[in-house]
Each structure stands twice: as structure tokens, then as C-alpha cells.
Image: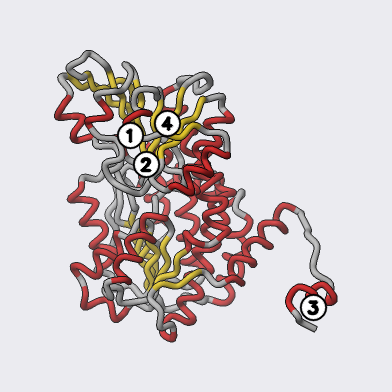
Amino acid sequence: MSEIRDINLAPSGERKIEWVKSNMPLLRSLEERFSKELPFKGLRVALSIHLEAKTAYLCKVLAAGGAQMYVTGSNPLSTQDDVAAALVKAGLNVFAWHAATPQEYDSHIRKVIEAAPSLIIDDGGDLVHTIHTYYPELCDGVIGGCEETTTGVMRLEVMASKGELKFPMVLVNNAKCKYLFDNRYGTGQSVWNGINRTTNLIVAGKKVVVAGYGWCGKGVAMRAKGLGADVIVTEIDPVKAIEAVMDGFNVMPMAQAAEKGDIFVTVTGCENVIVPEHFIKMKDGAICCNAGHFDCEVAVADLEKMAVESWEARENIRGYRLANGNRIYILAQGRLVNLASGDGHPAEIMDMSFAIQALGAEYIAKNGRDIKEKIVNVPQEVDDTVARMKLSAWGTSIDTLTPEQREYLYGEK
């Protein structure tokens, strides 16, 4: 049983999935192994990740390992209907469509949870939140799961600190082969792909304000600089602020940056980063977008209230005119600009992140019942395995320590 827009869109989705598959050698290798070993045989996997082609291929890899898949998206605007149709045609259970209303999005999340999953693969924490809040009786049946992104990790840590988390969750986002590459290089490229595709404007010569200098913010700032922008960073963490200064960027509070920026990108994981006091200071024609998981970083609802006029300026761009006459433009309704206005991270980057997901899920499937901790870091051997797989796919080799070197460094003989 599935709920999608149109099964007839499947051929287009199948082409997209085949394209990313051809550029994801790590997942291809895992698919081959999983299809022989069937590590997920008899298990129901609930998955909520941005439902586009790369995620779809991850779903097919897990299904090849014996999983019965129940799939939904993690953002109403990032679901691609042709990809959802392709998964249904392949025999997976999918509950998602593009531009779902909040009620529809919630219903799809619940449909996935109502399958009584054995494993949960989450992106932002909506599945974990829903099962604990509305279906606590199903928690005992969950062996454990994996969390993809920074926002979801933050939510899990809060639940764990309160003693509310009922099963172990692997923090995929905290693996080196995830945050060093996905968050930095993946976000950095895909955010500007989304902005440039949507606006068709030049970046060179503009002042770009990046709110947040975590790994995602580092990537967005680095790529903006590479495109020729004058980059300003806003931060609340003094150490990250020092890092941004030493990386060559201007650092200042948002109240000051609001007067200078041409393009604003929020990447904080927090709410109300850009609010009315900032909007009123912005230049005529300022562009605001968000690259954090939830659409609460730019206060779009407040902007709508203070605007004297609003209009669709271009597909995925909403214009707002303030009482002072200035125009402010919001991309993708303040949702994730790289997915709501693009195709998300490059396939080669997600190959690493989703290999971590797949191996993390396998680890939980095999060991979850014996794990006492509720917050679980990705095992080092999994991180190292993915790194070596990636190097091998590139045809790149590295040195290894000699026995003498191991004894010198670690006292091992």
C-alpha cells in the first residue's frame, strides 16, 4: 500500500535512479554484498530522508538486503514524485508527494510508523519524535536506527538527556566520512546550485551573509568565496567565529550584517535567525534562503505580516515589499534551498553518507538488542571502511604503518 502522486511518472524516476547509481560505487558494492548476505531479512525499515534519486537508491540497496521498506520524505518540497513512483513500481511502500501540506506530511510520517518498524532511518528526527509521541507502544519493537543530519542529532541528544529515548540511534551525521564531506563539500556545492538555478543571478561581487559556521556553513562560505563573493559570517560560538576570521571572512552580528548583505544563507539548525528587525534593515532586492533542516531559520511568516505586498517573482522565489519600499525575496519558502530548489548533494558525496547509513543500519540490525547506550557513535571501523572504499573507487592508495612504526606510536608489537 502506497500513497504517491502518479505511478505513471515511474520511467522518469527510474532514469534518475540509474544515473546516480552509476556514480555511487560504494552503494553498488554494498548492494552486491547485501543481496547475498541478506542482513535485513525479515526486518521492516522505516525511512524518512529527502526523497530524491540518491535516497531512492539507498532504499533499493536496503531492500536488496532483505528489508521490507516503508519510505517517506523528510521535507515536503524535496520529494520528487517521479522518484517516489519508481520506488513503488520496484515494490517498495512509499508515502510521499511533492508540496505536501503540513497535514499530509504528518499523515505520511504516521503511515510509515504504523508499519511497526524494526529499524528507523531518520533525517531530522521526525520519525523518532512521532513514534515516541504518538505510538509509544511500538517502541519496544524497534531494534534501533540511524540519524542523518545535525538537527536530528540535536533532537536525539535532548531526548537522551531527559531519559526519553527508548532505543539506540547511530549518529551517522557525526561520522568523519559524513560531516567532513557531506556537510562541507556537499552542502557547499548544492546550496549554490540551488540558489544559482533559482535566481539566475551572478554571485561574484555580491556580499553574501552566511549565518552559522559549522561544517555546513564552512562549505557554503567557501563556495561563495570561490564564486567571487565578499563573505560575511555571523556566529554565536566564539571559537567558530575565530575560525571564520582566520579563514579570511568578516564576522559580525546579524543586526550589522543585515545592512550589508545581498544574499543571506542560514545554516544554523536554530530558529529565528533572520527576523523582522533584520528585514527592515536589508537592502532593496536582498535575497534570503535557508540551508538548515527546518523552515524556521528565516521568519517568513513574520515577513508576510509586515509586507505591504507579496508576489511570485519567479518559480520558487516569493517577493515581499516592505512599507519603506524595499523588496525582499525568499527562496523555496524558507525551506532547504539545495533540495527544494535543486537536486541536493552530488551523488558522489551522498555515496559516502549513504554507505555510512547502510553500514550503520547493518550494525544496529546485528547488535542493537545488545547495545545499552541510546546515543551511539558510528564505529570507527565503519568510518574507516567507507574511507577505504572511497579511495579504492578513485584508484587511490595510501601508505600503511610498518610494524616498527606501530610500536613507536602505539606500543604495539
In the image, taking residue 31 as reference, residue 6 lies left or right, namely: left
Crowdedness near tag 1: few (<14), some (14–19) or many (≥20) residues, C-alpha within 10 Å: many
Asked if residue 14 can be seen in this view, the reply is no
What residue did someone put label 3 on? 407
In the image, taking residue 245 as reference, residue 4 lies left or right, namely: left
For the point 47% across and 73% down, which residue is it? 66
Q: Is tag 2's residue or tag 4's residue first in the polypeptide sequence?
A: 4
| Residue depth check, mark 2 versus mark 4: number of the one nearer the observer | 4
Quarter placement of the C terminus: bottom right
In the rendered structure, which amino acid carries the disc numbered 3? Glu
In the rendered structure, which amino acid carries the disc numbered 4? Val
**Contact? badges 1 and 2 (CB < 8 Å):** yes
For the point 53% across and 37% down, which residue is it? 245
Q: How much space separates mark 1 and mark 2, taking CA atoms?
A: 7 Å
What residue did someone put label 1 on? 332
In the rendered structure, which amino acid carries the disc numbered 2? Leu
Q: Is tag 4's residue or tag 3's residue first in the polypeptide sequence?
A: 4
- Label 1's element? helix
Q: How much space separates mark 2 and mark 4, taking CA atoms?
A: 16 Å
- Label 3's element? helix
Q: Position of residue 412 (x, y in %)?
A: 76, 81
What residue did someone put label 2 on? 336
In the rendered structure, which amino acid carries the disc numbered 1? Ala
What residue did someone put label 4 on? 209
Quarter placement of the N terminus: bottom left
Crowdedness near tag 4: few (<14), some (14–19) or many (≥20) residues, C-alpha within 10 Å: many
Front-lying residue, 409 or 198: 409
- Label 2's element? loop
